[in-house]
Amino acid sequence: MSPLRLALQTGRAALDFALPPRCAGCGAITAEIDLFCQQCWGEVEFLGAGGCSTCGIPLEATDAETCGAYLASPPRLDRVRAAVAYGDTARALVLRLKYGRKTALARTMAAYMKRALGDLQDALLVPVPLHRWRLWQRGFNQSALIAAALARTTERSVAVDLLRRTRATPKLKGMNVAARRKAVGGAFALRKGGEVRGRRIILVDDVFTTGSTAEACARLLKKHGAASVELVAWARVVRPTVA
């Protein structure tokens, strides 16, 4: 073993002893980074490759390949996938990343999201943007951090500033579908000089709920000639809360 490799391994061992890897969910010590402990692993609902061929929503007790919602109103997004279902543990990671400033969790999310990217190796990763005031308050765009981590681990190209949110939009929680679409309509633009004609785009976001924001982004990208627009998220709402 070379002296350099020995030094690196020794340094890694010392670092792990001083700052051992911890569970992304609860903080318990784990064997490797970006892992969940046994309890948190059991609480996370991982989404596989099944479900609706377009939106990825799990389909139960049916041989259909597409869901009824897609057949009734085909979306602008060509494909949607998420690593996990939105639940307590998945939500905790999102909150710790966004408001707890635990930016290393972007790498953890990306580690599980990369399997949902599909085979479009030439696709351009594009994070869903924040408005500049929200970006100033938070200091970072969590979707951009995740997209950059995905680009590093999958050797794909990323354009973190391709899309701009041109106006602040209200929180969409509690709005019906029509109100959500109205709230985000016309709220996005391409950066000056941005070119997407003929490109395959994969939008990156932390949470996928009704898809209104992603649909607005997809509508804009296709208007400017994008060949296809998909979305990959850390978590998605699978069972909407009933009021």
Image (tube, rainbow, N blue to C red):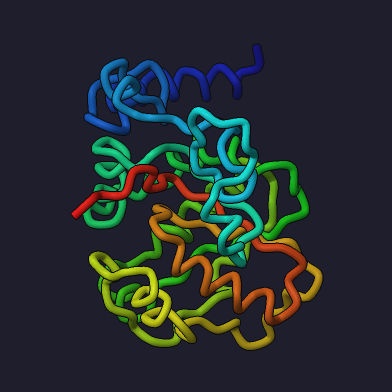
Residue 152 placed where, x, y %?
61, 46
Q: Nearer the viewer, residue 148 or 121?
A: 121
Residue 20 seen in this snapshot:
no
> Residue lying farthest right?
198
User: Residue at 36% of width from left, 21% of height from top?
Assistant: 14
> Residue lying farthest top?
1
Quadrant, the C terminus: bottom left
Q: Is residue 169 above or below residue 53?
A: below
Q: Which of 118 and 159 is in front in this view?
A: 118
Q: Is residue 11 above or below residue 112?
A: above
Q: In which quarter of the image is residue 19?
A: top left
Q: What is the number of callouts on the image? A: 0
User: Residue at 60% of width from left, 33% of height from top?
Assistant: 49
Q: Is residue 62 above or below residue 104?
A: above
Residue 48 placed where, x, y %?
54, 30
Q: In this view, does 133 lie to the left or right of 54?
A: left
Q: In this view, does 158 lie to the left or right of 14?
A: right
Q: Quadrant of residue 157?
A: bottom right
Residue 133 placed where, x, y %?
31, 81
Quadrant, the N terminus: top right
Residue 82 seen in this snapshot:
yes
Residue 129 placed where, x, y %?
46, 71
